[in-house]
Image (spheres, rainbow, N blue to C red):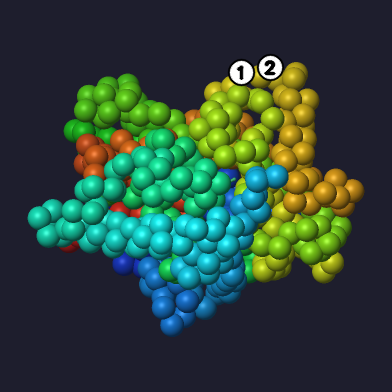
Amino acid sequence: MSDFDAVVIGAGNAGLTAATSLQLAGLRTLLVERHNLPGGCATSFRRGRFEFEVALHQLSGVGAEGQPFTLRGLFDRLGVSDKLEFVEEPDLYRAVVPGRFDVTLPADWQGTSDALEAAFPGNRERIERFLQLVKDVTFWQIAARRGMPPEQVDPVLFRYGLRPVKDVLDEYFDDPGLKSVIGTYWTYLGQPPTRLAFQDLALTLYAYLEFKPWHLMGGSQALSTAILDSFLAAGGQVRFNTSVEAILTEHGRATGVRLDDGQEVTAGDVVSNASLPLTYAMLGEGGVPPAVRDDLATRRIGVSGVVLHMGLAATPAELGFTTSTTFVHADEDDERTYAAARTLEPARGICVTSYDVAPIGFAPSGATHISLMTLQYGDHWAKIPPADYARVKFAYAQTLLDRVEAVAPGIRDAIEEVDVATPLTMARYLGHPGGAIYGYDQDRTEGWLFRNSERESHVPGLHLAGSWAGMGGFQPTLEAGARVARRLLRARAAA
Ligand SMILES: Cc1cc2nc3c(=O)[nH]c(=O)nc-3n(C[C@H](O)[C@H](O)[C@H](O)COP(=O)(O)OP(=O)(O)OC[C@H]3O[C@@H](n4cnc5c(N)ncnc54)[C@H](O)[C@@H]3O)c2cc1C
């Protein structure tokens, strides 16, 4: 008999929901995490009087109590709903290009339409048609993903779903400012409007406009800890500060793992929340099926980021923050802003999250906790000589501060605590190549129509869950772990 029914490698969002779903279904499950706490990206840390959220900016998938969306059901099934306190954000975001526009979009369809029309008059009819397109493409995309036969799916999905965002925005609008404001969420998906599939932007806009952006009291760490507690209460076992070094196989089937202290643990099934390159490397020489090797060679390691976590001795209002989420860009040239993610030129676009406009409990009264984030790939950071790293990191961080001064002019004077994370920081804490935060580059070739790594490990008994096997982000990875667990349980029941 195996030591466990299942071993889960990694306690990121998908690892946690997979492990807990399996344990709650009665499988004896071991969760192995190399870090000393649960969550992967979904964690927080302390500096002085402040707690800092590592990753979560806006949680999608929650929905209001009267209009719940998928995550509420998942949290119920995991037994964590009564441990979570959701914080609703009234606005989608404020988008600023100094000297060009400063627009705040409320998190509802009519409010967004009104705000866009007020900022870019004369576009009402186009805006309404565009928002309807967002709804239609999303509706039919969800239907298609749930298995509706293609002949029953409205052709609007096939006409627009895979077109680059830029094409669709150009078809609907002339004003570059309007296009830039309504397309701003490309930065959340890590791909510029020329490479991002319209259906992905549409889904993101729909998720936040229809079901609102949320946060959690205690940040994403509160969620990770609650899920882990539920796993442990159901009898699951966890090993922190422990890496899986190898996935054991017999006759091509995964049979367990070897831990970094040399201990071998056998299991009927192995679920990996680690990156795909690392997961397959753990199978060892000759263990990777040729189909996988060929596939991995065609994929691009995705984007990471530089984040300035700051504790500020002033309130959001005193600093000039009116919304939880503000995007400040140098201009409307999103392609140039994306290209800058491969260089150390001054940050051209930042996402500013002020966690105390709708407080999540991380800053003391009268103070504010914010993060400034810009997209950066890991390659050029890996080439910086160690002796230069600190200097380069802090010089680059200054360029994010320069950018935020457009909306918070006195911010430098209010800094009490500051910490800077780079792609190398993400790589160190997550173990992911390039410090990638959404797995592979989420361009059109990675969409659900072309790839489904989650279903295709090609190694019996090995299951893949998380941003590297599907879509990155909180909602997708939380749901992915539970989905993979359901599939695994069905397969065991059928065997
Ligand atoms: C700064 C930042 C900002 C972000 N902003 C947002 C946002 O606003 N909205 C959003 O939706 N998403 C955001 N994301 C992305 C989102 O957080 C991630 O896509 C998601 O959390 C990834 O979840 P995952 O399940 O893939 O696991 P990950 O969080 O990638 O965790 C994987 C886990 O596996 C562990 N592991 C790896 N190898 C091993 C091994 N060999 N043995 C044991 N353990 C191992 C790692 O230590 C880690 O804990 C952000 C991420 C970051 C870092």
Q: Residues within 10 Å of mark 1 (few under 14, many from 20)?
A: few
Q: Name the image quarter holding the C terminus.
A: bottom left
The residue shown at (24%, 52%) is 157
What residue does disc 1 label? 383
What residue does disc 2 label? 385
Q: Position of residue 352 (x, y in %)?
A: 67, 51
The residue shown at (55%, 46%) is 177
Cβ–Cβ under 8 Å for marks 2 and 1: no
* Quadrant housing residue 363: bottom right
The residue shown at (73%, 59%) is 321
Q: Amino acid at mark 2?
A: Pro
The tag on residue 370 is none
Task: Indicate the secondary structure of the residue bearing disc 2.
Answer: loop
Task: Indicate the secondary structure of the residue bearing disc 1.
Answer: loop
Q: CA distance from mark 2 to mark 1?
A: 6 Å
Q: Position of residue 360 (x, y in %)?
A: 67, 67
Q: Amino acid at mark 1?
A: Lys
Q: Residues within 10 Å of mark 2 (few under 14, many from 20)?
A: few
When the figure is inspected, residue 92 is found, relative to residue 403, above or below; the finding is: below
Q: Nearer the viewer, residue 167 or 121?
A: 121
